[in-house]
Image (cartoon, rainbow, N blue to C red):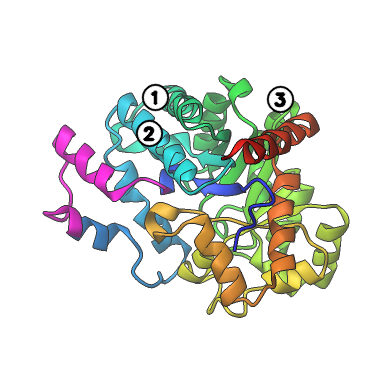
């Protein structure tokens, strides 16, 4: 149900949640890393969510398989390259890929700067080879605490010119936004745009804090906003985007069913909602799948889906001239097709 009248953009996809099971298997064999299964097919059953998880933390544990095989810089470069390649294969024209240097570095104690450099190199190579525009978002993994996030931010800022934004992800309920005010002030002072995971595993106050304390101009997930009409009105008025991920929200337990996802109410309130895959490697989905879910399960019509697609272009961490260039390039390509 994606329209071919507009470029396709996705703003919330975790690179470290997009690792192919075949690559996990190959890297484990290459580096002699033990996995809890003895075949690639068995790994798929283990690493891909079969129905749903009990909560966000169990969902995040599924990501551990992908990062457990990142033994060196080449492995990090490979998974970055393949993640962008997969997005291009889906027909996406612009994507923002986010990743946590700490999360990717931890299994083999890699220097975080090495991880950053390798991932950025893989993204750049794939972007050039497959003709897809990619923005990189650095994640601070709140689950590891303030000190780890400080080191993570330093690694990201060492290559500030290669990032379009900064994010806070992980154990939302246990590590509230107020703990990371200093880190996000540093990031904003460096000119970075801000998106924050909020309202996924905690209530509306988490979203208010992401905006007021951290300077978020987009919110990852944000399903809890439905509990606070004043918050919904504020987000709509100030054009603060909601990066909606319906399949993920069901799998993490943020929503008990997809049919009643607040996406429909958010749109009715005038909020700038976008559709995203979150972690397609463990959810085994594509962006087109999420648009089908939005239409066939949540019940959005073609006009609403087109508005969501337009929102993604408007909400992208690009300059106005870059957004215009993306549209011009897309339409030129369409006209030149045989």
Disc 2 marks which residue?
Answer: 105
Q: Is residue 309 above or below residue 322?
A: below
Q: Are marks 1 and 2 in contact (CB under 8 Å)?
A: yes
| x and y percentages locating residue 197 in the rendered image | 61, 53
Disc 3 marks which residue?
Answer: 190
Q: Which region is colored magenta?
A: 18-41
Give the mark nearest the N terminus, 1 or 2: 2
Can you name the residue that lies furthest to the left here?
38
- Tell me how far mark 1 sits from mark 2, CA to CA: 7 Å
Can you name the residue that lies furthest to the right here?
237
Q: Residues within 10 Å of mark 3 (few under 14, many from 20)?
A: few
Check the picture and name the quadrant holding the C terminus.
top right
SS assignment at label 3: loop
Give 292 or 172, whichever is nearer the viewer: 292
**In which quarter of the view is residue 172 placed?**
bottom right
Visible in this render: residue 125?
Answer: yes
Disc 1 marks which residue?
Answer: 111
As drawn, is 161 to the left or to the right of 71?
A: right
| x and y percentages locating residue 255 in the rendered image | 56, 74
Give 102 or 297, whichever is nearer the viewer: 297
**In which quarter of the view is residue 150 placed?**
top right
């Amino acid at each position: 149900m994606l329209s071919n009248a507009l470029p396709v953009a996705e703003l919330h996809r975790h690179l470290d949640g997009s690792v192919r099971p075949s690559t996990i298997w190959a890297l484990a064999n290459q580096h002699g890393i033990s996995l809890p299964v003895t075949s690639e097919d068995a790994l798929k059953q283990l690493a891909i969510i079969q129905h749903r998880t009990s909560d966000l933390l169990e969902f995040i544990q599924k990501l551990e398989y992908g990062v457990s095989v990142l033994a060196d810089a080449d492995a990090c470069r490979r998974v970055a390259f393949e993640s962008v390649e997969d997005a291009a294969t889906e027909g996406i024209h612009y994507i923002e890929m986010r990743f946590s240097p700490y999360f990717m570095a931890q299994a083999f104690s890699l220097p975080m700067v090495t991880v950053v450099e390798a991932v950025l190199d893989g993204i750049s190579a794939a972007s050039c080879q497959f003709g897809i525009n990619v923005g990189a978002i650095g994640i601070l993994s709140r689950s590891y605490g303030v000190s780890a996030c400080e080191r993570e931010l330093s690694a990201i800022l060492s290559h500030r010119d290669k990032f379009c934004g900064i994010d806070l992800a992980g154990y939302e309920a246990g590590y509230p936004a107020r703990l990371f005010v200093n880190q996000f002030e540093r990031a904003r002072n460096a000119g970075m745009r801000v998106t924050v995971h909020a309202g996924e595993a905690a209530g509306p106050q988490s979203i208010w804090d992401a905006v007021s304390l951290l300077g978020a101009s987009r919110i990852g997930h944000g399903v809890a906003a439905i509990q606070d009409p004043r918050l919904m009105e504020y987000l709509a008025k100030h054009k603060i985007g909601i990066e909606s991920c319906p399949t993920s929200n069901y799998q993490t337990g943020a929503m008990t069913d997809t049919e009643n996802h607040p996406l429909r109410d958010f749109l009715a309130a005038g909020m700038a909602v976008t559709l995203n895959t979150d972690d397609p490697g463990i959810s085994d989905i594509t962006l087109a799948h999420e648009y089908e879910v939005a239409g066939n399960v949540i019940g959005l019509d073609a006009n609403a889906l087109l508005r969501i697609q337009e929102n993604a272009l408007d909400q992208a961490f690009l300059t106005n001239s870059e957004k215009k260039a993306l549209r011009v390039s897309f339409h030129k390509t369409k006209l030149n097709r045989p």
